[in-house]
Amino acid sequence: MGRLFGTDGVRGVANADLTAEMALGLSVAAAHVLAEAGTFEGHRPTAVVGRDPRASGEFLEAAVVAGLASAGVDVLRVGVLPTPAVAYLTGALGADLGVMLSASHNAMPDNGIKFFARGGHKLADELEDRIESVYAEHRTGAPWDRPTGAGVGRVRDYAEGFDRYVAHLIGVLPNRLDGLKIVLDEAHGAAARVSPEAFARAGAEIVTIGAEPDGLNINDGCGSTHLGQLKAAVVEHGADLGIAHDGDADRCLAVDHTGAEVDGDQILAVLALAMRERSALRHDTVVATVMSNLGFKLAMEREGIQVVQTGVGDRYVLEEMKDKGFALGGEQSGHVIILDHATTGDGTLTGLMLAARVAQSGRTLQDLTSVMERLPQVLINVSDVDRARVATSAELATAVAEAERELGSTGRVLLRPSGTEPLVRVMVEAADIEQARSVAGRLADSVKSALG
């Protein structure tokens, strides 16, 4: 069995890779591992369990709840809510564990399981490794130590979670959204009720699309991975801006009043300046990944804001933020973490904060995002190569050095081995798109030559 936990929980095709038996077994294993770690010591443990609207989430939720209760954990079942809502409620309710069933922006047949520790933070790598190990051990027949009688967990629905989360979102906004007309694309996902309710309570006039989940249509031609409908709707309705979420609403992309896309880098830039203005940007620093556009970094440097870069993945952004005490971080894909108010990327919160800046400033989103200019970026995936030798190939190092000399300070090169496939990602940024394509093509050829 290969490693189950990826950078964002366990994910796969529901009922093929991710089965009810696996969901139950991982949940029991998580309960035992956290008990051994002392998390439950001195009290009766509680878990918050939520899901996105995928059809498979219904049986997987039942399996997770059964597994936790069979291990002596009381369960608060919050139903269909965004991933950041489950994280928030885990912390706000003092629960020992949170479980979210979602495959985020993936197509409907996929699903996933993500565990949160006490406080709503992602589990440490060593705990995930231990859960996987314990699950594998008992999957082969080792018996569990099972409570009986009053020791088994109790299960109840916690419908109050919806209002409690929405109230939290409204409570942290720096100003209201009165006067704004906003189109919301909910990706037929977990925020289909939460996001419209939050924006409306904050004072915005809203138009919703992709807000009728039926268990089968999540992310289907809509949401943050398919912005076409949102762009058209913003222009059609004469809206001030549009907000798009993914299936579990932990990310946010936007569209300005002209229908132009606003990516995660631009959102970070706007929020960084807004937070600094109200003295909320600690250390005048924002955390981003190495995949962020060079235009973002240059803009922040020009504005006197430091950019700290991490490896790709919002968990690495979050680790850096927690370690150094930074307040804002995120990814180009729209995972934005505002650590004073959330322990994970929160698409609804990000959208609200972005709209709040538009309302407070009296400027259009297009004007606000003009603080940075996105440099042309070309990405080529080079397959069937030995990704392990990226860092040690002298031939490749020479090719990269030549490319960097050609680009100078107005461009950038990044070679990144895939974490799951035998391929290397070649990314080149330059002031001119043709130069970016030319350099990327030559580097891709060098990767094939050196590592093929």
Image (tube, rainbow, N blue to C red):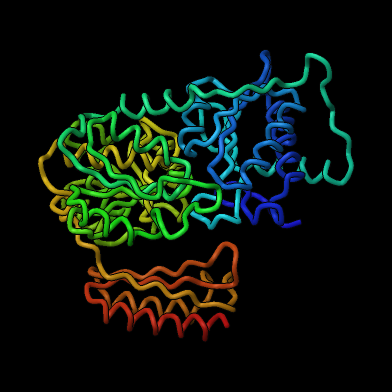
Question: How far across and down, in percent of the image, does residue 367 sit?
Answer: 13, 52
Instruction: Residue at 46% x, 29% y: name it.
Output: 88
Location of residue 451 by image quarter: bottom right
Residue 32: image quadrant is: top right
Residue 286: horizontal and vertical position, in percent?
30, 44
Query: In the orientation shown, which residue stands out farthest toward the left?
Result: 362
Q: Quadrant of the C terminus?
A: bottom right
Q: Quadrant of residue 375?
A: bottom left
Q: Residue at x 59, y 32 (%)?
A: 49
Up the image or down, 117 lies above or below 186; here it is: above
- Whether residue 159 can be seen here: yes
Q: What quarter of the picture does the N terminus occupy?
A: bottom right
In this rendering, the answer to whether 59 lies above or below 173 is below
Residue at 68% over, 44% down: 129
**Above or below, comparing residue 139 to residue 407 in the picture:** above
- Compared across the picture, whether 380 is left or right of 159 comes to left
